Structures are given as structure tokens and as C-alpha cells.
Image: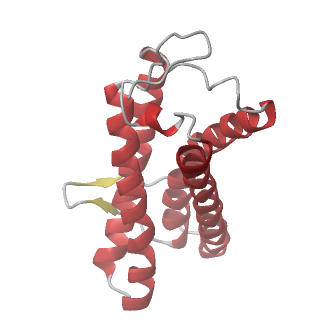
Amino acid sequence: MQQVTETGNPTRGYSLPMRILHWVMAAAMIFTLLSMPIAQYIVTQPFYDLHRAMGFVLLALVVVRLFFKFTTKAPSPLPDTIPPVQKFAANATHILLYAALTIHPFLGWYATNAWGVKNIPFFGIWTLPQLTEKNRELGNQLLAIHHWAGYFILALVVLHVSAALYHHYIRKDGVLERMLRT
């Protein structure tokens, strides 16, 4: 069913590259978030390496997604029936997610180097360059920030998903469909 605006014009969803990147990033985030508790409780290096490599993948996906965000046609604006405070919250959540998903991998990378891991493998293909020398105290502090920042990202994702489901099942205003079709 094609959604229409109050003026009767059809709405435009996100571009195909943006939709693909959205869902690939969602899967990568779930995988990355789950790999860390497994690494901590099983304490195996491959899961730590997997978590770090996936963090770098997410960083690359954010860069690609930002490129497409600024080079592809934007979707139709949110419906006028959505209150301005909700539009502001949606925009702020997206900005915070982009910022957090850019800063968080760098923070983890820097913290891991500071903690004393010089060579962070990227799926066994290459190693990420070392950003800093060993400083275990700084590394511990940065890893703690990285840990809590992960919870912040998780809270943003829960807010994002909750809002999408609210608009889809309660308001039935076509907001979620923008990410499901062009």
C-alpha cells in the first residue's frame, strides 16, 4: 500500500542503499553486542578479536551510510501529524546514533591499544594500526567509558526501535514503511 501525504502526493521511502545499510548495520550491531559478553564469560581471544573487528566493520558502515545519506535523495519528510517534539526526538536520536557509532569504535580501538594490545587483527586479514603506546591505567579508564557508551548506544537503539514499532502498530502513519520500501 503506497502512503500519501496530506496533500495527496505519494511518500518516498529511503533509497535502496540506505535501506540495505540500515539492516546490515542492525545485524552487525546485534552480532557485535553479543560477541562481547561471550568473550567476557568464555574468555577466549577469538571472541575479543571478533568484537573488535566487527566494531571496525560498523565504523566503515557508518562512513558509507553517511556518504549515501548526503548523496542520495532524502525520503519524504515525516508526516505533519507527528508532533514537533517527536520530530525533534527522531532527529536527535539519529544524530546521536551516528555520532556514537563513529566515536565508539575509535574509543575501543584506542583503549585496547592503551591497555597493551598492539596488534588488533581484522578477521586475520590485517592488523589495525596502533594508535597509542601502552598505558594500562588509561586503557582501563577508556575501556570503562567504552563499556558504558555501549549501553548508551543500546538505549538509543531501543528508543529507535520502540518509536518505529509505535508508529507502525499504534499510530499506523507509515513511518516504518519509509525504511521498508523506496
Q: Is residue 30 above or below residue 44?
A: above
Camera sees residue 157: yes
The quadrant of the rendering that contains the N terminus is: top left
Give me the residue at 36% from left, 30% from top. 181
158 or 97: nearer the viewer:
158
Horizontally, residue 36 falls left or right of residue 16, namely right
99 vs 121: above or below: above
Furthest toward the right, the residue is 85
x and y percent of residue 63 in the render?
44, 34
> Which quadrant, please, contains the C terminus?
top left
Residue 75 rendering spot, x and y as whole percentages:
49, 21
The colour scheme used here is secondary structure
User: Is 168 situated left or right of 6 in this image?
Assistant: left
Query: Relative to residue 38, is residue 92 drawn left or right?
Result: right
Quick check: 4 left or right of 146?
A: left
- Where's residue 96, x and y in %? 66, 43
From the viewer's perspective, is residue 169 above or below residue 46?
above
Residue found at the far bottom of this picture: 42
